[in-house]
Structures are given as structure tokens and as C-alpha cells.
Image (spheres, rainbow, N blue to C red):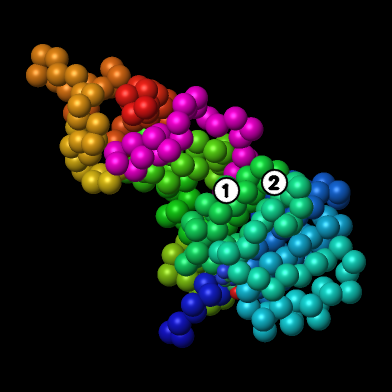
Amino acid sequence: MKKRPLGQNFLIDREAAREIVLQADINPEDPVLEIGPGKGILTEFLLEKTGALIALEVDSKLCTALDARFGSNPGFKLLEADALKFDFGRIGPRFKVVANLPYYAATHILKRLIYFQSHVIDMTVMLQKEVVDRLVAEPGQKEYGSLSVFVQYHNEVRRVLEVGREAFSPPPKIDSSVVKLIPLQIPKVDVKNETIFFKIVHAAFLHKRKMLKNNLKGWENQFLKENGKIHMAGIDLSQRGETLSLEDFATLSNFVHPHHE
Ligand code: SAM
């Protein structure tokens, strides 16, 4: 099959497109950013809802076609740009995001949007199902990892729709899911130092099958040994990282924080 470096699997199921736009819950005055409009299946439904749509597409051929189709609509603005490098602050002070993201860059683009989250009202995005499984995963589930913690620390996350591969042309090898992310004004848990928090989270999941006492060796001088068990901040380190909640990670990082100053 022809290689598609830009992740160009276009949605052809109009009912799925309509449902994605419905899930975005757009008011007429909401500014909306669409990333990767492609041939415009979501764009068409989005323009029925908002008078202020900015579409950001990297492929110049697609941009020419999009401009021909929607360019006369005063509510439509097209930017030919790369979402992996784009300064989303330029879009405006507050906007919604709706996108069927290209697989190859989906998590990267999502992380960039979270970086700009003070501008984001909410995001309704389609991604590969396997990534959405990680975004919504809870402690104890095998998909739970540092991406789950990072995204859930900053957002309320909800899966809103499953979309099978047959809804696309050409059909990809995997299924997709739509997820809704609502940025939190205050992070989910109270963390004194985010750098240390995420260092601990990354270390805890580095070797997923290892116990925390092995993955967190960098903080070994703060371990407490008691009755043959190893603890830190009251958390048993003979478990794996995947069992810890966001609160547990906050407890660990808030405990080690003062020792690093
Ligand atoms: N929204 C359309 C749909 O649902 O049919 C297209 C979705 S397709 C999965 C991904 C789209 O993102 C393509 O149009 C592709 O050209 C575009 N794209 C890929 N990489 C991009 C990037 N780095 N920045 C902006 N758009 C990109």
C-alpha cells in the first residue's frame, strides 16, 4: 500500500463526522480550531455551528481544495502550517479544538495543545483507539502509564465515541476513538514541584514490570526500610508504578521535594 507520511486517512462516514461535531458542543460564538481538515468532512459540519473557524492544514494541495470549497465563507480562515511547530497562542485568547489527528503525530500534537491549554476551552479529538485507551486508563489497567498521568493531571478526560477503521478511506489498520479533554483550571492533584512530580512518574513507568523500589533508585537515600518492606512517604515500593494513583504520585513527589533543595 502507498505510504502516507502525513497520516492521510480521510473520514468518509458522514454520520460519524456529524456525531464528532455534536460532541464538541459548539455555540455559534465559539472560536474553533480544526487541525488537519483534510478534504473537509468535519469542516463542513463545523461551519454549520460556528461563525469563527480556523483550519490548520500542512498539505498545500489540500489547502488549495479547501480554499476553493470554503474560502467564500466569511467565518472560515485557513492557515497552511505545521501543527507540530505552530504557536497555538496565535489562534486567539480562547478557542475550542476539534480534530481528526494524523496518527503519526497525534500524541505530539496533543501534548503541544496541553502546553497551550490556557487558551483551550476544550478539545474533541479523534486518535488511534490504543492511544485513547492510554489517555483514559485508570491505575491497575495495563494501558495506564506516564501519558495517562500527564494528561489526567491537566484535564478531565472522557471517551465519547468509537469509530471503526471502515469509516475511513483508505482504511487504516487500526480503529479510532474520539476523546474529549477539558483543561482543568487547577491541576488534578496538589503538587509542589511539577518537574519532580513528572520525573518520578517517568521513572516509575520506565521499566513497567519492575517494582517501584528498582525504578525509583535515584531517590534511594529517602527510602524507609521497615519489617523487610521498603516504603517512601508511606507508599509501599514493592508495587509497580501502574498501581499508583495521581494522588500517590503527588504524595511521593511532595515528600522528596524538600530533600532536593
Ligand atoms: N479531518 C480530515 C478527516 O477527518 O477526513 C482529515 C484527517 S487525516 C487523519 C489528518 C489530516 O492532518 C490530513 O489532512 C493531513 O494532511 C493533516 N496533517 C498531517 N500532519 C499535519 C501537521 N503536522 N500539521 C497540520 N496538519 C497535518
Report the residue at 57% width, 47% height from top.
114
Whole-percent x, y for residue 38 in the image = 65, 73
Report the residue at 45% width, 53% height from top.
131
Q: In this view, does 256 lie to the left or right of 39?
A: left
Residue 28 is inside the magenta segment: no
Determine whether label 2 and label 1 are within 8 Å by CB.
no
Report the residue at 46% width, 85% height from top.
2
Q: How far apart are marks 2 and 1 (CA)?
A: 9 Å
Whole-percent x, y for residue 79 in the image = 73, 70
Report the residue at 62% width, 49% height from top.
116
Q: Nearer the viewer, residue 195 or 175?
A: 195
- The answer to whether residue 17 is above or below residue 92 is below
Q: In this view, does 219 lie to the left or right of 88?
A: left
Indicate the quadrant of ligand 1 in the picture.
Answer: bottom right
Q: In this view, does 120 lie to the left or right of 261?
A: right
Instruction: Specify the quadrant of the image occupied by residue 183.
Output: top right
- The answer to whether residue 164 is above or below residue 216 is below
The mark found on residue 115 in the picture is 1
- The answer to whether residue 191 is above or below residue 11 is above
Position of the C terminus by quadrant? top left
Q: In this view, does 247 lie to the left or right of 54?
A: left
The mark found on residue 119 in the picture is 2
Residue 183 is inside the magenta segment: yes
Tag 2: amino acid: His
Judging from the image, what secondary structure is the residue with disc 1 in? helix
Q: Nearer the viewer, residue 162 or 203?
A: 203
Q: Is residue 137 visible?
A: no
Q: Nearer the viewer, residue 218 or 72?
A: 218
Q: Is residue 165 visible?
A: yes
User: Which segment did they paint magenta?
Assistant: 178-204
